Image: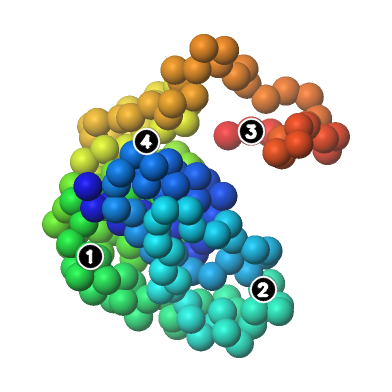
Amino acid sequence: MRIALVDPLAYTPPYDHHLAAALARRGHDVTLLTSAFLHGAAPQPDGYRREELFLPLSTRLLRGVPRARARVALKGIEYLPSVWRLLRRIDRLDPEVVHLQWLPRPEVDVRWVRRLRAPTVLTAHDVVPRRERALPAWREALGLVDRVVVHSERAVEQLRKLGIESELIRHPVFEAANPLGPPHGKTLAHQDGPSQLAEEPTG
């Protein structure tokens, strides 16, 4: 199966990498469509292709200063051309499934999501957008896709309250033999185990 995995602004390179590599190991033809990751080295593709289509100008000019204020303005200018580049690339790839990891600007993104012809999956990392004005577009996007991947039972409840009727796919962690409990205390998880950090509310 040909799969296009889309993370426009490279929010979660390790997540994208492990998902793409796992799909490739199952024999699927996977292309990750994303941008350059400016906060460290992105994992090297393992059995899949990574194409950095988004934000080429700001990436090239401001690679050494990823938090520069100028980058915000450049990102705004580059975003729409990057979206058109993405749509053209998806057309050429002719995927059988498009998996959207993130929709950074739902108000803009919902317009191109409407144009996708292949079956679509969206992972709802943030169930409710942080910007209230993005909520109508986010709700529309969730309704446009064929499947929504969720990470918790709370996420299922939140999406149903939003009136989302798309079929929900529970993340495999739901099926774990020893399911993880909710976070508690002052911990931050990383690959070597938890470390102490100031407590931060979850969700």
Q: Quadrant of residue 149?
A: top left
Between tags 2 and 3, which lies in front?
A: 2
Q: Position of residue 36 (x, y in %)?
A: 54, 70
Q: Is residue 114 above or below residue 20?
A: below
Q: Residue beneath label 1, please?
A: 93
Say whether disc 2 or disc 3 marks the residue closer to the N-terminus: 2
Say whether disc 1 or disc 3 marks the residue closer to the N-terminus: 1
Measure how far apart labels 4 and 2 are at the Cα level: 30 Å
Q: Residue beneath label 4, please?
A: 149
Q: Secondary structure at mark 2?
A: loop
Measure how far apart labels 4 and 1 are at the Cα level: 23 Å
- Circles 4 and 2 in contact, beta carbons < 8 Å: no
Q: Amino acid at mark 2?
A: Pro
Q: Position of residue 5 (x, y in %)?
A: 36, 54
Q: Quadrant of residue 105?
A: bottom left
- Circles 2 and 3 in contact, beta carbons < 8 Å: no
- Circles 4 and 1 in contact, beta carbons < 8 Å: no
- Residue lying at 85% horizontally and 34% vertically, measured from the top left: 196
Say whether disc 4 or disc 3 marks the residue closer to the N-terminus: 4
Q: Amino acid at mark 1?
A: Leu
Q: Amino acid at mark 4?
A: Val
Between tags 4 and 1, which lies in front?
A: 1
Q: Residue beneath label 3, please?
A: 202
